[in-house]
Image (spheres, rainbow, N blue to C red):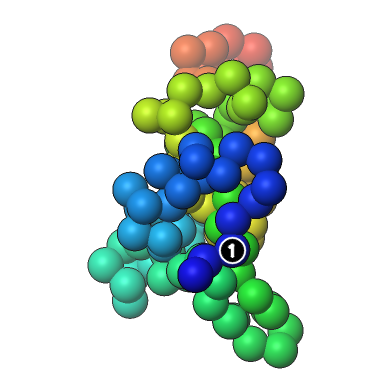
Amino acid sequence: MSTVPIACADLFRAVMTAAGWRCQCTGQCGQPHAKTERRCPREHDSYVGKAGGWVRLVAAPADPTVPEQQAAAVPAARLRAWCPACLRAARKSAAVNAARPDGVQGGLFDL
């Protein structure tokens, strides 16, 4: 029996069942996950080790740029299973990429 959150348990189970109870990160976190078919190997309720502890996957938007305040309104079809480490890294990577200037202005202000 896998642990499930008290709130929205049916939604959580649906997302996790679709994911096979495994993190669905395919590199958005910055890791290629090359040794595990390009997908994070962490599974819900598995034990990573003394430093990592237990893995508790979360159902979060597939798009890591969606703010947490809007994530509750995302439809179930657009949710994915994430391990906390991949979700945190994917959000950080998305924020860094959003802060970069796009190539449209190119050398507009270069002297």
Q: Which residue is mark 1?
A: 3
Task: Please report the residue visible at 69 percent of the width from the left and 79 percent of the height from the top.
Answer: 53
Whether residue 96 can be seen here: no
- Closer to us: 1 or 21: 1
Q: Residue furthest bottom?
A: 50
- Closer to us: 62 or 46: 46
Residue 48 location (% of width, % of height) = 59, 81
Corner quadrant of residue 52: bottom right
Task: Relative to 5, say whether 65 is above or below.
Answer: above
Task: Relative to 105, say whether 51 is above or below.
Answer: below
Residue 81 location (% of width, % of height) = 47, 49
Task: Please report the residue visible at 52 percent of the width from the left and 52 percent of the height from the top.
Answer: 82
Q: Quadrant of the C terminus?
A: top right
Q: Residues within 10 Å of mark 1 (few under 14, many from 20)?
A: few
Residue 39 location (% of width, % of height) = 35, 61
Task: Relative to 93, say whether 103 is above or below.
Answer: above
- Closer to us: 75 or 34: 75
Whether residue 43 can be seen here: yes
* Residue at disc 1, secondary structure: loop
Corner quadrant of residue 70: top right
Q: Is residue 55 left or right of residue 78?
A: right
Q: Is residue 44 left or right of residue 22?
A: right
Task: Please report the residue visible at 49 percent of the width from the left and 38 percent of the height from the top.
Answer: 11
Q: Residue furthest left?
A: 37
Task: Please report the residue visible at 50 percent of the width from the left and 41 percent of the height from the top.
Answer: 10
Residue 93 location (% of width, % of height) = 60, 44
Q: Identity of the amino acid at label 1?
A: Thr
Numbered marks: total: 1
